[in-house]
Structure formats: C-alpha cells, structure tokens
Image (cartoon, rainbow, N blue to C red):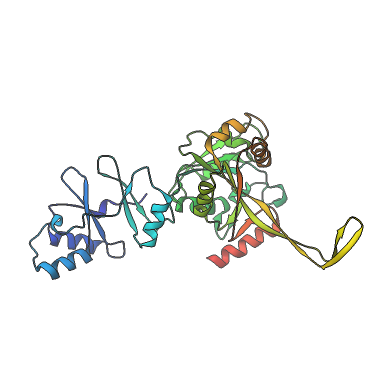
Amino acid sequence: MYDWSQHIIGEDASLVDALEQLNKLSGQTMVLFVVDADGKMTGTLTDGDIRRFLIREKKIDVAARDIMHRNFRKFKAGKIEVDDVREMRKNNITLVPCIDADGRIAEVCDFAACHSILPLDAILMAGGRGERLRPLTLTTPKPLLRIGGKCIIDYNVEELAKNGISNIAVTTNYLAEQIEEHFATPVGGVSVRCVKEPRKLGTIGAARLVGGLMHDNVLIMNSDLFTTINYEELYVRHIEEGADMTIAATPYMVSVPFAVFRSEGTRILGLEEKPTFNYYANAGIYIVRRELLETMIPPDSVFDATDLIEALVDNGKKVVHYTITGTWIDIGSPDDFRHAQDLAAHQN
C-alpha cells in the first residue's frame, strides 16, 4: 500500500510550508492532500496551484485552504469502478485518494505503481508435481522454479498486485512446505496465504477450500504460467458479458501439410491446399462468480477445471472466453521452461 502520510498537509499550513513539503516530494508525484482539524480531506494542492495563485494574487501570507483545489478527483473507499480507474489514467492522474464515509482518506491509489484496481479475489493453483520437468521438480515445486532470477509464481503474484488484487491465496500439495515458507514474507507488497489440499483434488477442486473471499468474482489461475494477459480487459469482458465464468483462451493454429478435399458425401467439390485451422485453447486462467465455487464444485472430490466448465454449460450458465493477445506460456516441459527463460531475459 502506498505511504501517503508525506502528502498530508493541514488547512492552516502556510504557503511557504506547502512549498517546502512539495520540495521534499521531488522525484515523486508532487501533490498534497489538504485536511481539516478533524482529518477530513478538503482539497489538493500542487506547485502549479501555488504558481497560479502567486501570479494572480501576488500574495504570500496565505494558508493552504486559500490556495487548494476543492473540486478534486477521488474514489469512494471500497467502491472503486474500473471505468473510474480508466478515467484517471486517461487524465494522467497518478495519485488518487480513497475517501471513507467520514470524509477521511482511507488509502491512496498510486497509478505509477499499479495498472488497475480490480474487485477480484485470486486463487493460484500450485499443487501439481511438475513431472514433465523432472529432475528440476524432484526437490523444488514447479511454481518456485526460477526464470529471469525470479520464481515463476512471483511473476503472477506481482502482476495481480499491480492490478489492485490483494486478497490472494495459493492452493498447495506437492512440497507444500516450500511454498508456504516462500510466502512467509510478502511478495509484490502483498501477503499471500496458502491453503493445503488434504489430498489431490484435481486442477480446480481445491478452490472450494479457500475461505475469506470478499468479492463477487474470483480469478483462478494455474501458478506455472508466464503471461502478459491484460487482467483488466479480462475482468471487463466478464462483467460486460454478464458471464458466470470467463475463460482466458490462447489462439492455437493447426496447419495441415496436404491438400484437403471439400466434399459432399463422396463427391469432391474442390481442394484447399495446405489449410490452417484456428482454434482457441484453454489458457488456465478463469474468472468465476464466487457462489459457483460452492454450488458447482463438489466437496472433497477430484474435480478439474474442465469438469467445472462442463457442469456450468450443462446447467445453463453463461460461459464465455477472452482471447489473450500477449505472451502466454504454460511451463509444462523443458522446452517451455527454456522459452520462458529466454523471454524473461529479453524483458529484463
């Protein structure tokens, strides 16, 4: 969370005090949040506000309340909408205070450090054995293998944190104690809690074990992915579609190295030379309505993500897909691992 205490100034502070405090913010976002004697926020103050006041009034013996901008941009604490976030980014507003019901600052959103603020909980599935990556995974769980000097799972946790997702849980099984030890300290400024499966519960069954979910929708993903997916766009698609489940998909092309008949029965109508067919493959990232984790995932049972998708479709629920346009690698084989390492080295 951003330390906004250095941006607080009282209404009675002098113009000189304000200039001195702004000067100490050099290299940071140079804005002050003006508060009254009760700690309620009443305005913002920038060096531009002060310059314009001096040019206009040619007075220096004034207080912050006389110069501040009263019609300031703010969020309502606990009720931040994605459209509001996009509006702030569009207007290049970096620091936005979140105001509680009493008019006080509850927290400050720093858009220099985060991309968005999504009302999502997140569950990362990290219980697999990573058998295709042996011997690397004989003593290290796959999510803790390092690419570009960082654990695979940390890339995902940090990216979730940059999208304002702070309630993150990791489900574990194989070598669970190593993952628990890894997350004993925060990653990306976020405290991550671990939930251990009592036994193997499939690719999504353990999601039902995770308590403490706060939002209406939950992002569930495999922890061994290396991806640049746009989580904000994924969430917006989910909401705009009114979906019960949104599945991130990756384009998959199949090229046939021969001429293919176009036919009707046994009659050939024409030929298509070496065609390419486009499909969409499950990318292992989902947004699901929270209530469905309890109603559609059976307790203490082996249950895969494909089982959940089929159950939702069979029960008439709305399941849609969102196509990933950036990087996506499922690190399941030595070749995938090397590819991810190459990409990470290039990004760094």
Above or below, comparing residue 148 to residue 300 in the picture: below
Of residues 25 and 305, the one nearer the viewer is 305
Q: Picture quarter containing residue 324? A: bottom right
Residue lying farthest to the right in this orientation: 266
Q: Is residue 235 in view from this perspective?
A: yes
The spot of residue 10 in percent (x, y) is 17, 51
Expressed as whole percent of the image width and height from the top left, the position of residue 221 reads: 58, 46
Question: In the current view of this chain or complex, which residue is farthest to the bottom?
Answer: 55
Q: Quadrant of residue 172?
A: top right
Viewer-side residue, 139 vs 10 = 10
Q: Position of residue 255 (x, y in %)?
A: 77, 63
Residue 258 visible in the picture:
no
Residue 28: image location, x then y, percent: 31, 62
Which residue lies at the image location 65% right of the left edge and 32% below the top edge? Answer: 199
Which residue occupies the foreground of this view, 212 or 296?
Answer: 296
Residue 194 versus residue 6 in the image, above or below: above
Count of numbered badges drawn on the protein: 0
Which residue occupies 21% across, 54% down? 70
Relative placement, left or right, of 111 versus 316 is left
